[in-house]
Image (cartoon, rainbow, N blue to C red):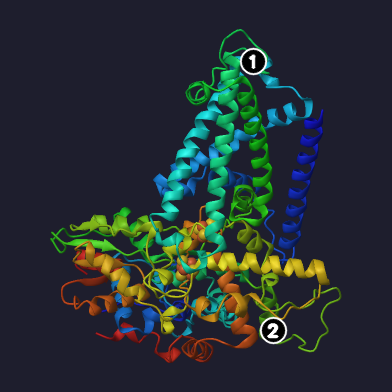
Amino acid sequence: MSLHVPTMAEMMAKGESPEILFWVGCSGSFDDRAKKITKALVKILNECKVNFAVLGAEENCSGDPAKRAGNEFTFQMQAMMNIQILEGYDVKKIVTACPHCFNTLKNEYPELGGNYEVIHHTQLIQELINQGQLALKGGGTYKGKKITFHDPCYLGRANDVYDAPRELIKKLDGELVEMKRCKTKGLCCGAGGAQMFKEAEKGDKEINVERTEEALETNADIIATGCPFCNTMMTDGLKSFNKENEVEVLDVAELIANAADL
Amino acid sequence: MVSIAVFAIISLAGFGFFAWNILKIRSNIRLGRDLDRSDRRSERWKTMALVALGQKKMFTRPIPALLHLAIYAAFVITQIELIEIVVDGLSGEHRTFREALGGFYTFMVSFIEILSFLALIATFIFLARRNLLKLPRFNMKEMKGWPKMDANLILFMEIILVSCIFTMNGADEVLYNRGLSHATDLGDGSLGLSVSSYLGPLLFDGMSDGTLHTLERIGWWGHIAMVFSFLNYLPYSKHLHILFAFPNTYYSNLEAKGRFTNMESVTTEVKLMMDPTADPYAAPAEGAAEPQRFGAKDANDLTWKNLMDSYSCTECGRCTSSCPANITGKLLSPRKIMMDTRDRIEEIGNNVRKHGKDYDDGKSLLGDFITEEEIWACTSCNACVQECPVNIDPLAIIVDLRRYLVMEESKMPTELAGMLTNIENNGAPWQFSPADRLNWKDEA
Ligand code: SF4
Ligand code: SF4
């Protein structure tokens, strides 16, 4: 099945405007693992006939890593450029599969003049399922599987979204198992605050190893998450335990797309 | 008469010195930068009621929360008894309110006694926990020396205080039984207090009338002496939190935790850069504030709320024990960030008072107290902010220190410099061309 991914520019040329903009983000656009998450979400959007569009080549880094690294100049340059583009297309509602883009667009753009309704993809998918637009085929995709959810810091503590991803996992035919540190007490994967782009400081353990260890203690078959960075960190963590063939790291969007047979 | 005078002098000195110290702290906090937290009043009161008064966040760890509650409740309720002590002290009366309040008086003092008794038990458990159990969060590097002593001292003070209360009430009970108490005899044969009516006779029954009178006075004076020592010890101690928890939670950040502050000085410049009609050589507007340094190098570059945070810190270490960087052995400890900030602003405040506003002692928060290695280890995960029982935000300080390093000194880990260049050049933190953004669409 080919994906239907209109860009804002194409839509505008046709005199149309989408209901919602899918902000793909840099990871979702360029990182091989994250691209799969992007596609899973698009499949869901296509299946539900959501009227959406992407910015494509006009999208720019949201500026999140620059802001966390302390470079407010670079951040604000990025933000203002993006706001100009979003304004040009009169964007009102945005969905993103990256909690970092989500947080920045939602909380940090308004002060610079960018006001949108911003939602995380797990919230949108939950909405679609609740409205009956997406049906999960109880084909036993996850039957008997244990799934644990790793809270992305920028979704959980930063924005108090704990339920949407869990509600989705509960709709699968697997079992949701929680780690000892979860929800408000969830331990970071180690990537936030621009750490993704640098080596960690000297210590006696990598943060992602500590977190993966905890996930493995639940005996989960799948580590679910809702952030491309967490995904990378947990995947690397599994490798350090040589468990990459036994345990899978999947985004909630991928879990749902699989369960809906998309 | 002499005792009234002594009491009056002690009280005046006690309250006076305390007020002087608090004003000093207030002026230190005002060395910080402006920040507007005058909005959303009702939400602020609510936050204060829940977090400071209701200790909501303590209860994520229920056992210490209950023990702490016992000490806290005893502390708050005992202050009611203090009113009587002050009235008695200044009037030379004894148990002034007993006759007027009758049964309610007995109830109140009994209630205080029960709480004090619970507080005593809690204090012993806390002492054991700190000194015998070797809980990691109480034994980290930054807790060595004074901070550890501070924590123990206050627990000892608590024990002395409670012992004084029971000595005072217990001895008075025995005297009352003998019809010798200075409290008005209501013909009921006992003061009827919940703990000391039993404890008193048990401990003091065989003693002479004179000894009992002395003991009662030792208890009374000891009690008031402890109260004033405690009050004046507060400004030097982590125990300042019992007062500062209230304003500090009132002025909490009410925005989403993920939202970092917007730097308006930068906004102005970026707007100028993006506006083709702007005159880059235009003189700054009349009355425009002097440009501030970007971010924070020293404690007085932080906001007053960051500084108030530092004075409110209880050094409990909940932040540090939930910090992913600290858990995995990195140097960063959010508690240490708060302790350093307080130490440094104290130092700056003292310098300002001694040598005037522009004195430079050649030291700064970043460098002499907090190292670059510490601040770069932070993942901005907000665990410390979430855990803090008095709504302190160590992350805000870390971010401001980073801002200074990056924007004023261009100092950062090389990989981050590369990441930033990528964002500036090709709109992504990696070296990919913007034209390739949609390639995923057609990849199998
Ligand atoms: S925000 Fe930074 S300092 Fe606070 S817990 Fe997370 S890593 Fe530690
Ligand atoms: S910042 Fe808060 S959590 Fe951390 S030590 Fe201080 S009071 Fe405790």
Residue B275 shown left or right of residue A33 in the figure: right
Residue drawn at the location 67% of the way across and 22% of the way down: B95
Left or right for B9, reference A155: right
The number of numbered discs placed on residues in the rendered structure image is 2
Quarter of the figure with the C terminus of chain B: bottom left
Instruction: Determine the chain carrying the residue at label 2.
Output: B
Q: Nearer the viewer, residue B341 or B390?
A: B341
Q: Residue furthest right?
A: B286
| Amino acid marked by disc 2 | Asp
Name the quarter where the N terminus of chain B is drawn: top right
Do the residues marked 2 and 1 share a common chain?
A: yes
Q: Which secondary structure lies at badge 2?
A: loop
Of helix, strand and loop, which one carries label 1? loop
Residue A55: quarter of image:
bottom left
- Pick whichever, A137 or A17, lies toward us: A137
Residue B138 visible in image:
yes
Residue shown at the point (44%, 55%) measured from the top left? B131
Mark 1, other Cα within 10 Å: few <14 / some 14–19 / many ≥20: some
- Amino acid beneath label 1: Leu
Is B138 drawn above or below residue A54 in the view shown?
Answer: above
In the image, which disc is placed on residue B275?
Answer: 2
The Cα atoms of the two marked residues, 2 and 1, are separated by 88 Å
Mark earlier in primary sequence (2, 1): 1
